[in-house]
Image (spheres, rainbow, N blue to C red):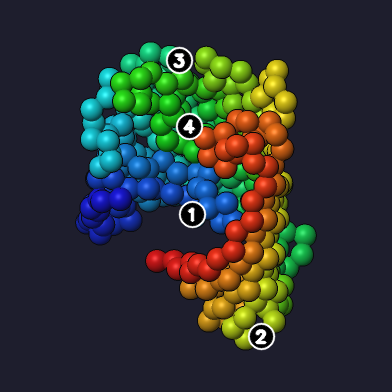
Amino acid sequence: QVYADITGLEFAPELTLWAGQRYHRIQDIHILDNWLMQDGDNYGAGVDGIRVGSKARLNLALYTQGSSDNSNASSNNARRANFQLRDLPVNPGGRLTLTGATINGRFGIGQNGNALGLLHNQADFLVSGLNNSLFVQTSSGHAGLDGKFYGLDNAGVAQAGAKQTRIAEVIDWQIGAFGGQALASYQTVAPDNAAKYKDTSVGGRVSYGVARNVKVLVDVGITSRAIDGQATQRLNKGTLALAFSPDNKFWTRPEFRVYLSRFNWNSPAAAANAATFGAGGRTSATTVGAQVEYWW
């Protein structure tokens, strides 16, 4: 991202005006390394921090389809308008965020599109130290669930839009030495020119501090894809890791890990991914390695 902003204007001291290419992110699912709500990655401009009530803030932005990666050379001539209404207090310990997008352009397959999203964050859910996030999102045409563009032309080849829905439930916690994050998600995608499919994922990562700077991590994930008229694809993954960080909490970074991961998938998944991990009919893999995760 490359952008500039300005704040502290006398006539609007709380607002931030910005222009350029920025992520404009809201919230991710850490263990998936996936931002479910964001509207950046393209050239745009906007205003952040419009007060709504005592605590909520409204962000507004306009984007073109151009970016530092693909310039603006595409026949779609797509434009996008987004809003983020963030952190609206709705109950004790609970905050609501609403997002929306509308897309206009010239598309060879499918139509313009719209997207709506809802995120409810609840602190101390059921017990102290347990946090809950509920995502509910829907989109149509060439609008993505996350609020960005979906299915822009690729090297002059028209891409399809889609009608999409997603619900994801995420919890995270740190209770004594025991921390982690877990999720369950369900997503449907109905492309304009192909069969509808449904993705389901359940998984989690837990950590347990065994010493001041040492924690054990266990990660398990189960994913499936059901395409209308085809056999269901299934992928399972498990990881065991030993991690070192400034303390033994789940969220503490930087973190150095030594890990062992085991993956297995069924024959339909291998056939659908024959050019990558399913090459030659392969249905399992094991990896061993080390990595560092550092945030800035």
- In percent of the image, x 43 and y 14: which residue is there? 109
Packing grade of label 4 (10 A; few <14, some 14-19, many >=20) is: many
- Give the label on residue 85, or none: none
Specify the label residue 54 is tagged with.
Answer: 1
Mark 1 and mark 3 in contact (Cβ < 8 Å)?
A: no
Confirm or deny contact between disc 4 and disc 1 (CB under 8 A): no
Quadrant housing residue 13: bottom left
SS of the residue at dot 1? loop
- Expressed as whole percent of the image width and height from the top left, the position of residue 135 reads 61, 43
- Sequence-first tag of 3 and 1: 1
Q: How far is mark 2 from mark 3, CA to CA?
A: 56 Å
Q: Which of the two discs, 2 and 3, labels the residue nearer the N terminus? A: 3
Q: Quadrant of the C terminus?
A: bottom left
Cα–Cα span, label 1 and label 2:
43 Å
Q: What residue lies at 23% left-to-right and 27% top-to-bottom? A: 73
In this view, the residue farthest toward the right is 126
Is disc 2 surrounded by few (<14), some (14 to 19) or many (20+) residues within 10 Å? few
**Residue 105 in view in this figure:** no
Give the percent coordinates (x, y) of residue 172: 66, 60
Of the numbered discs in the image, which one, if any, rests on residue 211? 2
Mark 3 or 4, nearer chain start: 3
**Residue ID for mark 4:** 144
Q: Are marks 2 and 4 in contact (CB under 8 Å)?
A: no
Residue indicated by mark 3: 110
Quarter-of-image position of residue 102: top left
- Where 283 falls versus 182 (above or below)? above
Viewer-proximal residue, 194 or 274? 274
User: Which label's residue is closer to the chain start, 4 or 1?
Assistant: 1
Cα distance between the residues tagged 3 and 4: 13 Å
- Give above or below for 38 relative to 209: above
